[in-house]
Amino acid sequence: MVYRWNFNGLLAAALVVLLFGAQSASAQLFETRAKQAFMIDAETGTVLFSKEADARIPPASLAKLMTMEVVFNAIKSGRLTLNDAFYVSEHAWRTGGAISGTSTMFAEIKSSVPLEALIQAVIVQSANDGCIIIAEGMAGSEENFARLMTERARTIGLTDSVFVNATGLPAEGQHVTMRDLVRLSAHIWREYPEFYKYYAQEAFTWNKILQRNRNPLLRMDIGAEGMKTGFTEETGYAIVGAVHRGDRRLFVAMSGLSSESERAEEARKMLDWGIRAFERTEIFAAGETIGRVSVFGGEQPDLALRAEGPIAIFKPITEADRLVARIVYQGPVPAPVAAGTRIGTLKVWIGDTLSQETPLYAAEDVAVGTLSDRAMDAVGELLVGWLRKYRS
C-alpha cells in the first residue's frame, strides 16, 4: 500500500509518480568512473549517491575496518584493554610480517606488542601482521576470528558481507559491498569516537620504522578523517573515505577504479560534490503528522502516522523537484491499534536513488468499531480486493 502526500510543495512535481506507485527512471545526479559506489550524509542517513552498491567484491584491506570493529567492541565491553600485550607467532610473522612482502608493521617474531600499537599499525600502516596477531590473540586462530567478524557484521546490520580472514588477503568466499562498508564506517564513528580518531593519524612508527597513512584523502586539505584503501587484481582500486567540514560529515565507499591516482581523484570529487550540492531540509517537525492510513474494522476509518522525532534530509540544491516520497505500509491496518505501534515506512527517493527510510508509528489509539462499522469495512475491502484482482 502506498500513501501519497505533498510536504511544503517539495513533491508537487512528483504527483503522478506517487499516485500510481511507479518509480521513474532517471540518470544519476553525479557521474563517476567507479564501478561501485555509495555515499551518505552521517547526520540524517541520507543516501546521496548509489551505484551498484550491493555488488559483492573481494574486500582486500577494506576488511580491516571489520577487524577493528571487533577489537573496538571488545574494548568497549571490557574484554580487552589497550595495554594488553599480544604474542607474535611465526604464522603471523611469515604471513603478514616483513618476510611476506605485504603491508606490515615489522613486528618481531616471538615478541609481544601492546594492543594500542597493533590498532594504530592496522589502521595507519594497513599491517597484515598486526591483524593476524590480534586474531590469534583474541580467538586462537584467524579462522575463528573471521567467524567472529561475520557474526558481528550481522549484529550491526551488515547484511551481505562475509569474512574469511582478518587481513582481507585473497580468500574464496570472502566479500563485501559498498553499502555495508559505509554502514560499518558510520557505525565506527558513532560507537567508538575514542578510536575513530586513529583513522586520521598521518603516520605511525614501530620497530624504529616510520610509515605514513596510505589514505590519499588525508593529504588533500578537504577535512578528511580516513578511512581505508584497498586493491585486488580482480576489482581494481578501492577506498572508504570520510570527510568532516563545518557541520557536515560524509562517508563514501568506491571500488573498480583503474589506478591509485584515479581512486584519489574520484573520491575527492564525489566528496566535494556531496558537501556542496545538497542542503539540509527539515521536512517534518517532531510530533508532526506525516500522513493518515486506512484502518479496517475500527471506530474511525484512518489513523495518523508520525516518526519518533523530526525528519530531515539533504536535497539537491539545483534539482529539488527530483525528490519523490511515499508512505509504504501493509493495509488497511486492522483494529485495534495502540499508539506507538510500528505501521510503515516513509521512503524518499532522490532521482532513482532510495535516499532515506524512516519508520512510522501510529500517533493515536484506534479501538475496534461497532458491528456495522466492521461490516461496512468488510464490504469495502471485498470490493477493493475484487478491483485489484480485475486490474491485475
Image (cartoon, grey):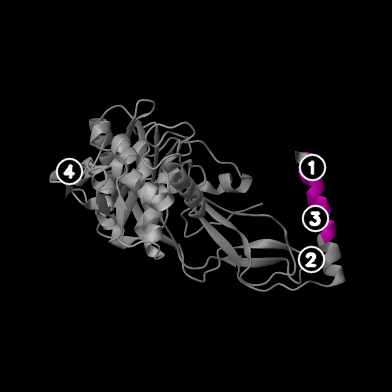
Image location (x, y in percent) of residue 202 = 18, 48
Q: Is residue 111 located in the magenta-colored stretch of the structure?
A: no
Query: Identity of the amino acid at label 4?
Result: Arg
Name the secondary structure under disc 4: strand
**Tag 4 residue:** 212
Relative side of 198 to 296, left or right: left
At horizontal 29% and vertical 62% (from top left) the residue drawn is 194
Which sits in the foreground, 320 or 182?
182
Measure how far apart labels 1 and 2 are at the Cα level.
22 Å
| Disc on res. 389 | 1
Disc 2 marks which amino acid? Gly
Quarter-of-image position of residue 126: top left
The residue at which mark 2 appears reads as 297
Q: Nearer the viewer, residue 285 or 255?
A: 255
Q: Which residue is mark 3?
A: 381
Q: Vertically, is 33 above or below 328?
A: above
Which residue type carries mark 3?
Answer: Glu
Seen in the picture, residue 208 relative to 236 is either above or below; the reply is below
Which disc, if any, is residue 50?
none
